[in-house]
Amino acid sequence: MSECRECYSSNKRITPMIEPRECLENHLQYICGTCGRCICINKTEKGGLQRWNFPFKTLEIAKLYLRTADVTNKTNCGIYEIKSAKGRKLYKIFPNEIELRKYLKNNKGKTCETMTPAYQHSEYMEFPNSEIRRLNAEEVEKYLKEQKDAD
């Protein structure tokens, strides 16, 4: 399958990656109206952060959560490569360069060499068939079966 034009993934059942049952049963999901992929858009209890706010190990994993950042911010967010003082790379999503600069100012050991997104869609688009809601039990079971079958 080619990359979904809405959620930017070529695997429509790749998420959730960690504890999929727990996430699908208990978290608010962005449901892609194009391919049906569920992406966690739930806020954490502590700090009210959404999954897309966290650092990712790879650009590919960050891309899986980019759509939820775009929808939350109503803009085409960018994924930036951040390096720690020890040289470790991570990828974070920011709605714009201003928010990236704030993050770097508050995290002195972190840098972004290019100050440009490693990945970003050219524009933000709305999709009429997408939904943000919790899944029911039947939907969770169907999605988990499809996820298992896709492996």
Image (cartoon, rainbow, N blue to C red):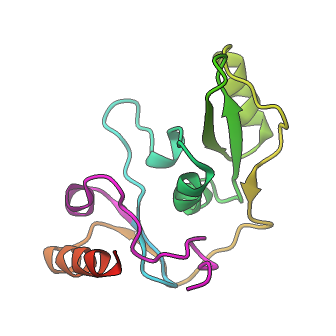
Q: Position of residue 81 (x, y in %)?
A: 70, 40
Q: Which quadrant of the view contains residue 29?
A: bottom left
Residue 58 point in image, percent of width and height:
57, 47
Quadrant for residue 21, please give it: bottom left
Q: Is residue 8 left or right of residue 49?
A: right
Our reading of the magenta stretch's main secondary structure is loop
Q: Quadrant of the C terminus?
A: bottom left
Question: Residue 43 placed where, x, y %?
Answer: 38, 45
In this view of the protein, which residue sits in the foreground, 150 or 91?
150
Viewer-closest of 72 and 38: 38
Q: Is residue 68 above or below residue 81?
A: below
Picture quarter containing residue 134?
A: bottom left
Answer whether residue 107 is magenta in the image.
no
Depicted 24 relative to depicted 19: above or below? below
Q: Residue at x 56, y 52 (%)?
A: 62
Q: Residue at x 69, y 53 (%)?
A: 77
For residue 68, say whether it is visible.
Answer: no
Magenta span contains residue 27:
yes
Q: Is residue 112 above or below residue 31?
A: above
Report the side of 139 relative to 53 (left or right): left
Image label count: 0
| Residue projecting furthest to the left | 137
| Residue at the spot 17% in from the left edge and 77% down from the top edge | 141
- Residue 142 visible in the current orientation: yes
Foreground pick, 100 / 84: 84
Residues drawn in magenta: 1-29
67 shown above or below 62: below
Quarter of the image where the N terminus is located: bottom right
Residue 33: percent from the left, percent from the top? 49, 82
